[in-house]
Image (cartoon, coloured by chain):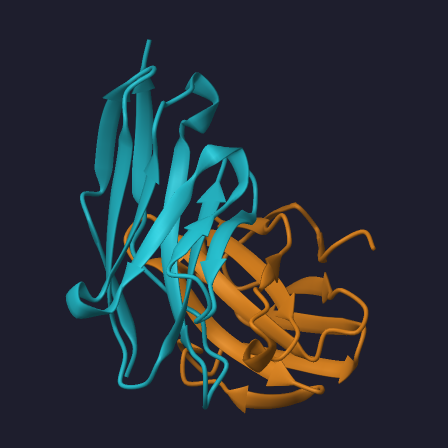
Chain colours: A orange, B cyan
Amino acid sequence: DAGVIQSPRHEVTEMGQEVTLRCKPISGHDYLFWYRQTMMRGLELLIYFNNNVPIDDSGMPEDRFSAKMPNASFSTLKIQPSEPRDSAVYFCASSEPRGQGTEAFFGQGTRLTVV
Amino acid sequence: AQSVTQLGSHVSVSEGALVLLRCNYSSSVPPYLFWYVQYPNQGLQLLLKYTSAATLVKGINGFEAEFKKSETSFHLTKPSAHMSDAAEYFCAVSEIFGNEKLTFGTGTRLTIIP
């Protein structure tokens, strides 16, 4: 398997624009996680899905953020409208159920810059 | 609620010296514990994991960690540092039973002095 695939790797956008980040999890993984990494706040869990259903979105910072998982092989994280404080690296990760002692596998991340 | 505390946001060691990165956890139920490494402009890569089997866990690149329930600790060690070990290291915890959240510490940046 090619691992977790995120696109784009880098995104520069103007404040107020819509931004969509994409993720393809590892085939067969039931769980998908979206994290945000910043210098100030470290790694924050934004939302996670189990079998395409959102389980916990308590980490989503505002209504400007939304995430979907229309099928087992694709998820999006959308920010509309974007603001400079959204600048961060966004990671997607996937895993099998933790009860099997498996770890989360991370993508390479999308570095978002909002100017 | 589960949490992880990593003592020391920056650690510097000389090449060939012992590496010790500290992690203490808090969990109301038995935990799974993980150490991840992040190289510049890369995603997180698993170093090792504790899943309630052996308390001394060996990982990749010569790293190991010991689960100590009495101290609620899971410190990461390597006997002899190599220049290639320079990176950021994250400790993480999740619950064996219950939700699947993986909660990370704030990270420790390891610098190797030639």
In the displayed structure, would residue A39 be above or below residue B15? below
Give residue B16's position: percent from left, percent from top.
33, 16
User: Quick one: which residue is furthest to the top in this view?
Assistant: B114
Instruction: Pick the residue in front: A15 or B74.
Output: B74
Q: Looking at the rendering, in which quadrant would you find the N terminus of chain B?
A: bottom left
In the displayed structure, would residue A113 be above or below residue A31? above
In the displayed structure, would residue B57 be above or below residue B95? above
Instruction: Pick the residue in front: A11 or B52.
Output: B52
User: Quick one: which residue is furthest to the front in this view?
Assistant: B54
Q: Quadrant of residue A67?
A: bottom right
Residue at 41%, 78% in the rendered image: A59
Give residue B75's position: percent from left, percent from top.
28, 50
Total numbered labels: 0
> Does any portion of residue A54 appear in the rendered image?
yes
Residue at 45%, 90% in the rendered image: B98
Instruction: Pick the residue in front: A111 or A18.
Output: A111
> Does any portion of residue B40 appear in the rendered image?
no
Taking B77 as reference, is A1 left or right? right
Q: Looking at the rendering, in which quadrant would you find the C terminus of chain B?
A: top left
Q: Quadrant of residue B54?
A: bottom left
